[in-house]
């Protein structure tokens, strides 16, 4: 095959950072284990460079999608390019097709759905027929129609040959694997949970020196009720004695709604705010507690770092976060409490944080080596040599 690229990774984007973070983790693992392989990531997520940090992973920025969430249901709106959501899908489809036609990757890894967001991967299936196309699926999908539709299985059977499953069947049983196998007609490869933070640790040999924090709180994207939740967190932290230490928020400070809510914390000198970025790793590893949203990426972060945590749920219609958090809470003591972000009370937050500050996380048997396992699988498909140790 006349290829100019070994592995091309496509990351779904639009709302949270979970899809892109998994893709970055796998890309970083490929570059670490197989430094001679050429690897490229394409996505519209504006935070990608911050997620990669100093890692040796290059990427192509597509115009970003933007998604609003109302009553647990997401809908596309104009992004920073101010191009209509559907038109942007058509334009990005042309971009992606041109990239694949030019680079002719040996292996193409698509995140989440075989058709891509707004079916933007479909035109690219017509070019570079020798490319091995792989679909990557998170541990618990939830009731996402675009994943479980007849159309997705038809697209997969016509162009894809492999599935990477980023989960651990010893945690949730084999039900999700069996459902994927039945729907797509192939047996997925069970990679384990993918952690971008695990890969970033290799950049500094696992050393993360820094001050010990009472806790970190991650609210990576603003949505319905974010300002109300921040007010509750301000009340909760205001009721915790300063002697426990400092607290640090990680948010998208470029979001007007998030930035406007920071005034709730005026007078709380032990609370500070940071832009979402790779420095979150060091702070999480040096924290005695955490408050996170129940996305795949955040749940994996706290399990890898063994930090006792409060998990918040946004109440999305697909039910993925509820199902996943419930399953993991039974197996990992990193997940101390799970609350709805709409109904949790400030007193519940305060009491739970105080509990987190007093407990230790037991060693988990959950497979958290998904990035490395996925990288080895993709490298083998690309004809890569044995991984560097």
Image (cartoon, rainbow, N blue to C red):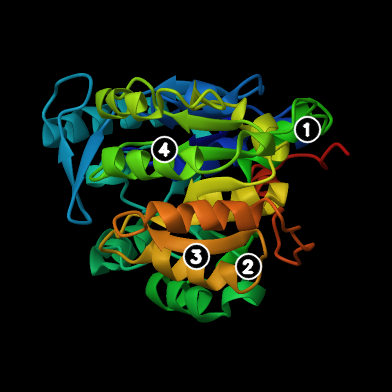
Between circles 3 and 1, the one closer to the viewer is 3
Which residue lies at the image location 24% right of the left edge and 34% below the top edge?
66
Q: CA distance from mark 3 to mark 1?
A: 27 Å
**Residue on which disc 3 sits:** 325
Which residue lies at the image location 68% right of the left edge and 43% below the top edge?
379
The residue nearer to you, when weighing 361 against 270, is 270
Q: Which mark is residue 70?
A: none
**Residue on which disc 1 sits:** 202
Which residue lies at the image location 57% right of the left edge and 27% below the top edge?
270
Helix, strand or loop for disc 3? helix
Q: Is residue 139 visible?
A: no
Say whether disc 2 or disc 1 marks the residue closer to the N-terminus. Answer: 2
**Residue on which disc 4 sits:** 234
Tell me: residue 235, above or below residue 369: above
Helix, strand or loop for disc 4? helix
**Residue on which disc 2 sits:** 168
Q: CA distance from mark 2 to mark 3?
A: 14 Å
- Labels 1 and 4 touching (C-beta < 8 A): no
Helix, strand or loop for disc 2? loop
Quarter of the picture containing the C terminus is top right
Residue 280 position by quadrant: top right
Q: CA distance from mark 2 to mark 4?
A: 36 Å
Helix, strand or loop for disc 1? helix
Tell me: residue 191, above or below residue 18: below
Residue 153 position by quadrant: bottom left
Between circles 1 and 4, the one closer to the viewer is 4
What percent of the width, then of the height, locates residue 294?
46, 55
Local packing at callout 4 (Cα closer than 10 Å; few below 14, some 14-19, many 20+) is many
Q: CA distance from mark 1 to mark 4?
A: 35 Å
Say whether disc 4 or disc 3 marks the residue closer to the N-terminus. Answer: 4
The residue nearer to you, when weighing 295 against 156, is 295
């Amino acid at each position: 095959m006349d290829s100019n690229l070994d592995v091309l990774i496509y990351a779904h984007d639009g709302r949270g950072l979970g899809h892109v973070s998994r893709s970055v983790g796998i890309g970083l693992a490929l570059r670490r284990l197989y430094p001679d392989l050429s690897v490229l990531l394409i996505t519209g997520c504006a935070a990608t460079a911050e997620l990669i940090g100093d890692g040796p992973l290059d990427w192509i920025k597509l115009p970003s999608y933007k998604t609003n969430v109302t009553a647990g249901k997401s809908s596309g709106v104009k992004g920073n390019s101010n191009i209509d959501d559907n038109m942007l899908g058509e334009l990005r489809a042309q971009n992606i097709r041109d990239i694949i036609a030019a680079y002719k990757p040996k292996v193409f890894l698509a995140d989440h759905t075989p058709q891509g967001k707004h079916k933007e991967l479909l035109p690219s299936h017509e070019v570079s027929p020798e490319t091995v196309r792989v679909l990557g699926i998170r541990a618990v999908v939830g009731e996402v129609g675009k994943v479980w539709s007849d159309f997705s299985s038809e697209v997969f059977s016509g162009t894809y040959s492999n599935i990477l499953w980023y989960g651990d069947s010893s945690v949730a049983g084999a039900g999700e694997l069996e459902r994927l196998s039945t729907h797509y007609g192939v047996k997925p490869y069970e990679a384990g949970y993918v952690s971008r933070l695990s890969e970033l640790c290799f950049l500094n040999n696992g050393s993360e020196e820094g001050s010990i924090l009472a806790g970190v709180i991650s609210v990576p994207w603003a949505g319905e009720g974010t300002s109300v939740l921040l007010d509750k967190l301000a009340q909760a932290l205001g009721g915790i004695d300063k002697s426990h230490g400092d607290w640090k928020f990680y948010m998208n400070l470029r979001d007007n709604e998030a930035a406007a809510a920071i005034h709730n914390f005026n007078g709380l000198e032990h609370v500070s705010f940071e832009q979402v970025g790779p420095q979150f790793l060091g702070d999480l590893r040096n924290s005695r507690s955490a408050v996170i949203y129940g996305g795949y990426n955040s749940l994996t972060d706290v399990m890898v770092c063994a930090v006792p945590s409060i998990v918040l749920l946004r109440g999305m219609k697909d039910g993925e976060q509820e199902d996943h958090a419930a399953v993991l809470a039974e197996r990992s003591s990193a997940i101390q409490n799970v609350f709805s972000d709409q109904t949790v009370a400030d007193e519940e937050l305060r009491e739970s944080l105080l509990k987190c500050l007093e407990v230790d996380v037991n060693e988990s048997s959950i497979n958290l080596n998904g990035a490395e396992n996925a990288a080895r699988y993709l490298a083998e498909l690309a004809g890569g040599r044995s991984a560097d140790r």
